[in-house]
Amino acid sequence: MLRDASRCFGQGNSGCWGGDFTFERCCIDSEAPLPAPLAESSAYPGCFVRDVVLRHAGAHAVFADLSLYGHQGCFLKNCSNTDKFEAVDPGICARACAAVEGCTAWSYGQQYGTKKCFLRKSDEGRASLPHWISGLKACAPKALLPAAVAHSAANSEGLKKCDAGKGEECPNVRSAMNTWIFAIDHLQMAFRGRVDADTWQHIERIGQESRNFLQQLTSPYRPSDKDFPRVVYNNRLIFTHLEGALASQSSSESFFSEDASLPPHGRRMPRSIPGMVILVKYYDTS
């Protein structure tokens, strides 16, 4: 039996007795028949294949900035250049693949005790593995309108509690600023080429100022306590100015806040949980 069968759900390579446990060497049975190639079928979630994992195998991984989708379980702990991340739902994995250039397939399952997403450039690394699922790029939940995502993220209760600055209800300004960047990125997608030059200049400016603030948090000259509220004030000013247009573009978009397939920034979280900025807790990339 396995050296630690519980780490592989009791499945895998029965000859794995080496001192160094690795997921691919111990959990994937190399003698099992090769699964058939993935094929497009019905709409999500009926399109993914069960009990199939897509291995990197030294050639099939897609490395990209996935920090908008996860902040743990990444390659070398760097979610800005990774082919994998922890996710609470396979839909997040599928949405990530749909958004990343070069990704043609994805896998989702448990690795080392946590739910992981793998992004792949092909399905050539197919292997049989119980409890894993895999799908092609087209196998994903319905894409969300950028305006709806921007509107939902910026108006979440968790982020609004940070408008006044760092405090008991906003203990983590890094996470809050990551959420603002997420919202601004989608604001730019929603209004590129659709607003006057002056408005677009303001949108670009708040995006750059938000990124500058985030970078300065780890620099020798860190921002003062007054810098965060100033950046947030400018961000909120632009979103308030565009509130009507955002709401209008979002009116046809219906999604439930508890939909686990949404990127965490796009969900409307509960109003309060003691000591935590709810919306942004998943995306502290420190």
Image (spheres, rainbow, N blue to C red):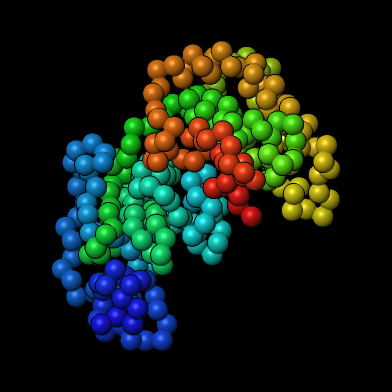
The quadrant of the image that shows the N terminus is: bottom left
**For residue 230, what is the image quadrant?**
top right
Q: Nearer the viewer, residue 210 or 100?
A: 210
Residue at the spot 54% in from the left edge and 65% down from the top edge: 76
Q: Residue furthest front?
A: 274
149 horizontally vs 4: left or right: right
Residue at the spot 40% in from the left edge and 44% down from the top edge: 92
Q: Position of residue 90 (x, y in %)?
A: 35, 48
Above or below, 259 against 245 in this view is below
**Residue 40 visible here:** yes
**For residue 278, what is the image quadrant?**
top right
**For residue 14, what is the image quadrant?**
bottom left
Q: Position of residue 28 (x, y in %)?
A: 28, 71
The quadrant of the image that shows the C terminus is: bottom right
Above or below, 2 against 115 in this view is below
**Residue 201 visible here:** no
